[in-house]
Image: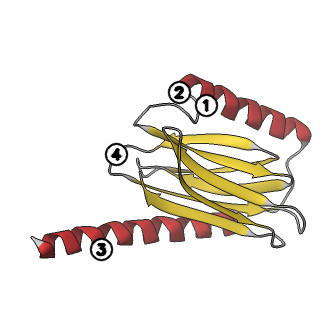
């Protein structure tokens, strides 16, 4: 049985590593143009509406998690949920992005600052609990988080 657990754990680590690598590649492919205020407003309104439809970051929903972005700068990034689909996002300022995160699944998110200055803080929240958190103040810094739902 110990062998099975080891193989299962290594398989999960390999999936997390693969998702993280794909997201880092995806971020490098994102162009470094700044979103206009109108683009951000449409994007941000969509994210807020979507979050309200499935719940808030304090939601007891077992099928979703949220990437909470807290920043004073522009950002772009990629999100991959437990359904193995990924999407790219961009915006400026604080935002919340919902993604599928069912029990036993894995997730991976990676966001990059679009400026030299400022701070980028990203939290992964599920059922009101912070699963992971990381921040950067580096010029054009990147925050990457991955784990099990």
Asked where in the image residue 14 lies, by quadrant, the reply is: bottom left
The residue nearer to you, when weighing 133 against 144, is 133
How far apart in space, not on screen, are marks 4 and 2 (Cα)? Answer: 17 Å
Residue at (28%, 69%) from the top-left corner?
9
Q: What is the crowding at mark 4: few (fewer than 14 residues within 10 Å), some, or many (at least 20)?
A: few
Residue at (83%, 39%) from the top-left corner?
39
Q: Point out residue 122 in the picture as x, y percentages from the top left corner.
A: 67, 55
To which residue does mark 2 refer?
54
**Residue 30 vs residue 17: left or right?**
right
How far apart in space, not on screen, are marks 4 and 3 (Cα)? Answer: 18 Å
To which residue does mark 3 refer?
10
Residues marked 3 and 2 touching at CB (< 8 Å): no
Residues marked 4 and 3 touching at CB (< 8 Å): no
How far apart in space, not on screen, are marks 1 and 2 (Cα)? Answer: 5 Å
SS label for mark 4 = loop
**Residue 132 vs residue 46: left or right?**
left
- Residue 103 has which mark? 4
How far apart in space, not on screen, are marks 4 and 1 (Cα)? Answer: 19 Å
SS label for mark 3 = helix
Marked residue nearer the N-terminal end (4 or 1): 1
SS label for mark 1 = helix
Marked residue nearer the N-terminal end (1 or 3): 3
Q: Point out residue 102 in the picture as x, y percentages from the top left corner.
A: 38, 43
How far apart in space, not on screen, are marks 3 and 2 (Cα)? Answer: 32 Å
To which residue does mark 1 refer?
51
Residue at (62%, 52%) from the top-left corner?
123
Marked residue nearer the N-terminal end (4 or 3): 3
Q: Relative to 55, is 136 above or below?
A: below
Of the 4 image quadrants, the one containing the N terminus is bottom left
How far apart in space, not on screen, are marks 1 and 3 (Cα)? Answer: 33 Å
Q: Relative to 105, is 40 above or below?
A: above
**Residue 93 vs residue 108: left or right?**
right
């Amino acid at each position: 049985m110990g062998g099975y657990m080891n193989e299962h754990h290594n398989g999960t680590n390999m999936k997390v590593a693969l998702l993280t690598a794909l997201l880092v590649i995806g971020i490098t492919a994102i162009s470094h143009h700044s979103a206009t205020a109108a683009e951000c407003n449409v994007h941000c309104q969509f994210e807020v509406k979507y979050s309200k439809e499935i719940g808030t970051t304090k939601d007891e929903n077992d099928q979703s998690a949220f990437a909470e972005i807290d920043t004073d700068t522009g950002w772009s990034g990629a999100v991959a949920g437990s359904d193995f689909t990924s999407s790219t996002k961009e915006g400026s300022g604080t935002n919340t992005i919902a993604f599928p995160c069912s029990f036993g699944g894995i997730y991976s998110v990676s966001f990059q600052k679009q400026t030299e200055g400022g701070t980028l803080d990203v939290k992964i929240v599920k059922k009101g609990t912070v699963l992971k958190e990381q921040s950067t103040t580096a010029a054009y810094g990147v925050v990457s988080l991955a784990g099990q739902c």
